[in-house]
Image (cartoon, rainbow, N blue to C red):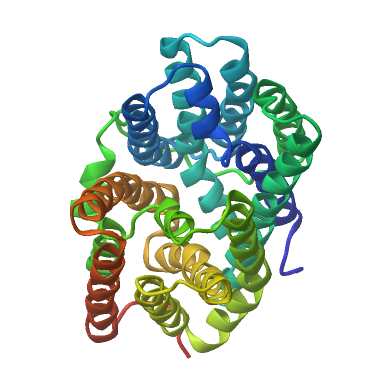
């Protein structure tokens, strides 16, 4: 059987087109919202509500996918919601409608995440999950390279024409939806019992294997202090560099992330997921400690190179690792529960980082994150031993 199966290819292409659409708008979203009358506070509330919606829905719909024994409907509905939300942001400018459109985008992500990652897990064996998840992350992140580049190219010719860019972003979203119809899903047994309620996925945390709770717990503590990438970009801006340098650093980071995802996934299959993941955390510590003192453009780009390697060594591998320690029948619930708490933890992390940044400045904020991550690295090294991983 081919390592990268038909379904893995299609899901990866779908994610690529979706990320092209989303990342095309990422750099200009705050600017656009300000042009239509949103204050900084209102933007923060908007993003907070959207992230909370994504977080809670990941857990519920992951659980529901396992309960119904289906993946494809959740994948298709999720990507459809994200696609149609893009033009909605440009057509109607009332704050309540913008809130609805932005939340719909994040709801789509919540609906599809658990089901998609469970389907990826179904397409792999314990010996190939690193490569399968790594390949998917590589394609997904390559979209995060193309998206901003296309946005920069368009705005070069049509400065400040943000509305049209939202409409253009609809087309790669439509392509993503079209490709989902080529996915072939295997039949799975339907679970007996009542239909899951919205917060029932929380029960999975109590009922899940101890190994799952130990691993996911460590990862979530890390997430609680791992703030948004925006703060790293803000550090470059505050060092006196222009917007082109800031966006260029973001594109460079995503390019490194995309290029290293598959090779590091392959390495995880050979050496063990724990070892590669710990190496990624070490890269993260170096980046945040270095960012606290960096002032030179070349140093910034060197640190963003390491940051791309960190992401490639952790993002897809964490999900692959989780699916190897949970019951296959509950894969979507396990991923959904973890990513639900992860989204909520990210909200807290960014709020905390913003507060510390405001009171104590960027240096202490970044150093504090590096110190906490060192503790998480030691925890994983000492406590995550007997987990059924791919270590050989």
Q: Nearer the viewer, residue 124 or 68?
A: 124
Q: Is residue 196 left or right of residue 278?
A: left
Percent coordinates x, y for residue 199 in the rendering: 25, 34
Q: Is residue 239 above or below residue 200?
A: below
Is residue 234 shown to the viewer in this render? yes
Residue 202 as seen in the image, left or right of residue 279:
left
From the top left corner, tell me how far across and down residue 327 is, in percent. 39, 59
Say whether residue 262 is left or right of residue 39. right
> On the picture, is 338 further left or further right than 14?
left
Residue at the (81%, 34%) spot, across then down: 157
Q: Is residue 147 above or below residue 192?
A: below
Q: Is residue 181 above or below residue 223?
A: above
Res 1 quadrant in image:
bottom right
**Residue nearest the viewer, comparing 261 with 321:** 261
- Residue at coordinates 38% horizontally, 47% vertically from top-left? 333
Q: What residue is rendered at 47% in x and 12% in y?
A: 97
Q: Quadrant of residue 326?
A: bottom left
Q: Residue at x 63, y 73 (%)?
A: 260
The extreme front residue here reads: 240
Q: Position of residue 143 (x, y in %)?
A: 69, 50
Seen from the viewer's position, the closer of residues 279 and 353 is 353
Return the x and y of residue 115 as percentages of the image width and height: 51, 44
């Amino acid at each position: 059987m081919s390592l990268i199966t038909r379904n893995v290819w299609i899901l990866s292409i779908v994610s690529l087109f979706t990320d092209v659409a989303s990342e095309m708008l990422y750099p200009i979203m705050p600017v656009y919202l300000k042009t239509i009358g949103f204050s900084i506070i209102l933007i923060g509330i908007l993003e907070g509500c959207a992230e909370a919606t994504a977080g809670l829905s990941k857990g519920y719909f992951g659980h529901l996918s396992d309960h119904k024994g289906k993946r494809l409907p959740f994948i298709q509905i999720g990507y459809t919601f994200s696609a149609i939300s893009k033009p909605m942001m440009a057509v109607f400018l009332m704050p309540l409608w913008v809130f609805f459109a932005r939340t719909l985008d994040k709801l789509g992500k919540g609906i599809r995440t658990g089901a998609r990652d469970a389907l990826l897990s179904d397409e792999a064996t314990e010996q190939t999950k690193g490569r399968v998840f790594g390949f998917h992350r590589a394609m997904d992140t390559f979209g995060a390279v193309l998206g901003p580049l296309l946005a920069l190219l368009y705005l070069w010719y049509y400065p400040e024409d943000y509305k049209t860019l939202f409409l253009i972003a609809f087309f790669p979203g439509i392509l993503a939806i079209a490709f989902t119809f080529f996915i072939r899903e295997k039949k799975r047994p339907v679970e007996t019992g009542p239909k899951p309620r919205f917060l029932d996925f929380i029960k999975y945390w109590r009922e899940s294997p101890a190994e799952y709770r130990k691993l996911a717990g460590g990862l979530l503590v890390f997430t609680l202090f791992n703030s948004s990438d925006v703060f790293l970009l803000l550090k470059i801006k505050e060092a006196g560099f222009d917007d082109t340098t800031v966006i260029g650093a973001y594109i460079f980071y995503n390019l490194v992330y995309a290029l290293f995802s598959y090779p590091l996934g392959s390495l995880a299959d050979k050496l063990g997921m724990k070892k590669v993941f710990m190496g990624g955390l070490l890269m993260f510590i170096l980046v945040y400690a270095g960012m606290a003192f960096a002032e030179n453009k070349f140093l910034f780009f060197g640190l963003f190179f390491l940051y791309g390697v960190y992401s490639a060594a952790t993002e897809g591998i964490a999900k692959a690792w989780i699916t190897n320690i949970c019951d296959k029948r509950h894969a979507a619930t396990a991923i959904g529960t973890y990513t639900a708490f992860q989204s909520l933890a990210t909200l807290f992390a960014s709020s905390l980082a913003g507060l510390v940044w405001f009171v104590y400045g960027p240096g202490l904020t970044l150093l504090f994150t590096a110190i906490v991550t060192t503790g998480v690295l030691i925890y994983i090294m000492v406590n995550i031993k007997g987990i059924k991983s791919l270590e050989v």
